[in-house]
């Protein structure tokens, strides 16, 4: 089974913390949709005839597409790829785009899962982030989506925000839970280069919270969502039973995926390819049949390091039997030697299935632990 990711590189405005590729000008939206369909047609062989089980519209803001544009892209996928009978079809959306009429159109186009970028239920925080929606719109759009029959809904939240009080964060979690989404993704705010937030931090206009503060918010999040019935299956992702993100899980499990559109990444099991993060160059490359991407073969060291980085973040953890099957004995011995330190300090636990998973405390340190387990030639 494989997945298709489609990047829609348009937003109405730039959020201050975001470093994803997008344009605030919609002038080239129509030719971009046409180019996406053309790229889908030219890359049919990439997935080696594997069945497609997930289609994911990311961005940017895919909810800016019309019903006709979405149907055009989806029809192209169905025409050229072997899609299973009931695929998971996700669309990322902003609350202010999701009026009732729009939600009905999305459902009619074939969207059966929404990923809604709520981020916060606080008016001042949303304005500081330069988000377009209000707290009321955030709540209303989820309720309307459920009313029109889109029941598989994920909402995004952000913690680790400057001046975010613990009690306020608890209230945000409570509001999220009360909406009864099937999935919640909660991310710690990070300072990415070339963003407004990075500029503000660099100038001393904004002070980011300490690790102690963000760790407390992280632990509270795990506790509150767990008590509400949400299972943490990846560091930042929680789901009600039966509603894990099949698309994102495929990334963590190393399945093949095809990335279409500017800045989109693809993986075929042995190599990666990524398209240029520039709308003009992407369109030019498609129109002139010239190269608009880069690619790389994945060697054993890279494959191991990527497996450690992704699998350690999940509830499935690092499978020792799989390590022995895929990698040479030097790499396996290195892992077993280095991971002992984290086991001894209560950060990693060995399960009955011979898997190494992070403890609750270890989850907050996931990236640092993974980097210490990397293999360096």
Image (tube, rainbow, N blue to C red):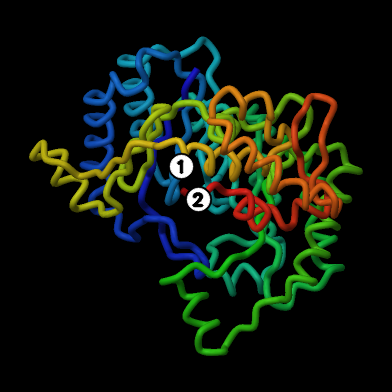
Residue of label 1 = 302
Q: Which mark is residue 26?
A: none
Q: Nearer the viewer, residue 99 or 122?
A: 122
Residue 101 in sight from this viewpoint? no
- Check disc 2: other Cα within 10 Å, few if <14, some if 14-19, many if 20+: few
**Residue found at the very far bottom of the displayed protein:** 204
Q: Nearer the viewer, residue 246 or 315?
A: 315
At 75% from the left and 31% from the top, the residue drawn is 355
Residue of label 2 = 376
- Check disc 1: other Cα within 10 Å, few if <14, some if 14-19, many if 20+: some
**Residue found at the very far left of the displayed protein:** 288
Location of residue 40 by image quarter:
top left
Location of residue 154 by image quarter:
top right
At 77% from the left and 52% from the top, the residue drawn is 341
Name the secondary structure under disc 1.
helix
Q: Position of residue 121 (x, y in %)?
A: 71, 61
On screen, residue 309 versus residue 102, left or right, reads right
Q: Nearer the viewer, mark 2 or mark 1?
A: 2
Q: Nearer the viewer, residue 192 or 8?
A: 192
Q: Is residue 259 above or below residue 45?
A: below
Q: Position of residue 277 (x, y in %)?
A: 30, 53
Residue 270 in sight from this viewpoint? yes
Q: Position of residue 375 (x, y in %)?
A: 54, 47
On screen, residue 306 versus residue 219, left or right, reads left
Q: Considering only order in the chain, which callout, 1 or 2, is on the residue closer to the N terminus?
A: 1
Q: Is residue 169 above or below residue 60?
A: below
Name the secondary structure under disc 2.
loop
Q: Position of residue 187 (x, y in %)?
A: 65, 55
Spatial distance from mark 2 to mark 1, Cα to Cα?
9 Å
């Amino acid at each position: 089974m494989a997945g298709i990711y489609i990047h829609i590189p348009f937003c109405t405005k730039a959020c201050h913390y975001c470093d994803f590729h997008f344009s605030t000008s919609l002038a080239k939206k129509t030719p971009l949709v046409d180019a996406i369909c053309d790229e889908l047609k030219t890359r049919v062989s990439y997935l080696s005839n594997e069945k497609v089980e997930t289609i994911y519209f990311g961005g940017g803001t895919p909810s800016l597409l019309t019903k006709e544009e979405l149907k055009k892209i989806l029809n192209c996928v169905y025409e050229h790829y072997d899609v299973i009978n009931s695929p998971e079809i996700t669309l990322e959306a902003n609350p202010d785009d999701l009026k009732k009429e729009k939600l009905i159109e999305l459902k009619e186009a074939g969207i059966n899962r929404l990923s809604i970028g709520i981020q916060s239920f606080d008016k001042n925080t949303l304005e500081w982030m330069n988000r377009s929606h209000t707290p009321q719109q955030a709540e209303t759009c989820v309720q309307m989506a459920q009313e029109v029959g889109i029941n598989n809904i994920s909402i995004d939240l952000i913690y680790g925000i400057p001046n975010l009080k613990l009690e306020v964060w608890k209230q945000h979690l409570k509001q999220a839970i009360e909406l009864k989404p099937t999935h919640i993704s909660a991310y710690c705010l990070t300072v990415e280069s070339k963003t407004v937030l990075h500029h503000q931090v660099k100038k001393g206009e904004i002070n980011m919270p300490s690790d102690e503060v963000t760790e407390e918010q992280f632990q509270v999040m795990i506790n509150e969502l767990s008590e509400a019935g949400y299972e943490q299956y990846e560091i930042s992702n929680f789901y009600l039973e039966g509603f894990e993100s099949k698309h994102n899980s495929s990334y963590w499990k190393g399945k093949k995926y095809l990335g279409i559109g500017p800045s989109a990444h693809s993986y075929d099991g042995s190599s990666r390819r990524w398209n240029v993060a520039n709308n003009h160059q992407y369109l030019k490359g498609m129109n002139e049949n010239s190269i608009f991407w880069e690619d790389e073969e994945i060697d054993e060291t890279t494959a191991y390091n990527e497996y450690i980085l992704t699998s350690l973040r999940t509830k499935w953890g690092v499978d020792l039997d799989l390590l022995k099957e895929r990698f040479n004995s030097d790499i396996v011995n290195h892992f077993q030697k280095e991971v002992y330190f984290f086991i001894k300090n209560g950060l990693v636990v060995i399960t009955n299935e011979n898997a190494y998973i992070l403890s609750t405390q270890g989850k907050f340190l996931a990236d640092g632990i993974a980097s210490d387990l990397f293999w360096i030639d």
